[in-house]
Amino acid sequence: MRAQANGIEIEYETFGDPADPPLLLVMGLGCQLVWWNEDFVQAFVDRGFYVITFDNRDVGLSTKIETHIDLMASVVGFLQGDAIEAPYQLADMAADAWGLCDALGLDRVHLFGGSMGGMIVQQMTVDHPERVLSLTSVMSTTGDPDVGQPTPEAVAMLLTPAPTGREENIEQSVVSGKFLAGPQHFDEDWIRERNTRAFDRCFHPDGQTAQLLAIVTSPSRSEGLRNIDVPALVVHGDIDPLVTFSGGERTAECLRGSEFLPLEGMGHDIPRYYWSTIIEHVTALAARSNA
């Protein structure tokens, strides 16, 4: 399904009963809606949520943003400390998501975002706190430059060009997926399946680069987060190499009264091992928000 939102088209899917409380799941850098595992989504439906997933701009089947910018040169310029231009910022992606909610007739929603998706739901909450029933930020950060920065190995992985051949691309995704998830909760079968789905559905590496520029050029959300009072949960793995643990700590610190859930052995992924833990905490958070 596709909706007109914020001047572009957003591809989305829904699960469950539209009469139930809506839960918007927001994906991370370069990731399509097919990255959400069906069992993970169904578990939320089983707990009484109406779940919406979607492709962020520039990935999957949503609108690709035309730009005159040399995207990779801008990334290199950022790493060298130069002032750079980005096609759009996280605030634009947050407006896309609110536009999707408007198209679906959803006035107030529960938000759940992972990685860049966590940044987007943070910005959504800063922009329209009155529309947020609860906020869950997973393996994410506030945009402050002194926290949550990737390890050198993670930076190198981000800058490695994606192979254009199908099999080579999938094999590299398994290698990077193992590095990000960490050795304890690495699920090769699922990583291979989701990356195969994504490659076959839409291969558009420039979209990930543009989204990366949005991340690094967007301002910090710390002050905005400190000024809101929304039921919030912050989840972070203690071995995350891409958004290191201090990013989650800062996010929880900024969100007044939030619950911080550190998870041992979790890297930059949401492993099946912790699904029930995370889902139960989100369900409890939603119950408190309705009290």
Image: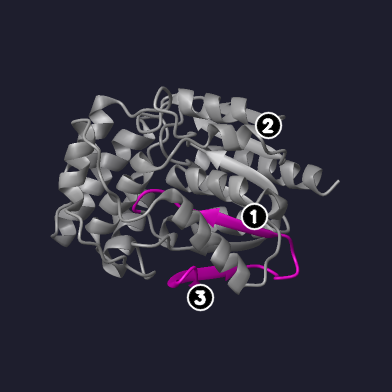
Residue 2 is inside the magenta segment: yes
Under mark 2, the amino acid is: Ser
Vertical side of 44 occupied by 266: above or below: above
Residue named by callout 2 = 258
Residue sitting nearer the eye, 1 or 173: 1
Residue named by callout 1 = 44
- Mark 2 crowd level (few <14, some 14–19, many ≥20, 10 Å Cα): some
Residue named by callout 3 = 3
Residue 274 point in image, percent of width and height: 55, 37
Vertical side of 217 occupied by 257: above or below: above
Residues in magenta? 1-30
Q: Secondary structure at mark 3?
A: strand
Label total for image: 3
Residue 69 point in image, percent of width and height: 20, 56
- State how the image is colored: one colour
Q: CA distance from mark 1 to mark 2?
A: 21 Å
Residue 36 visible in image: no
Q: CA distance from mark 2 to mark 3?
A: 32 Å
Residue 209 is inside the magenta segment: no
Residue 160 visible in image: yes
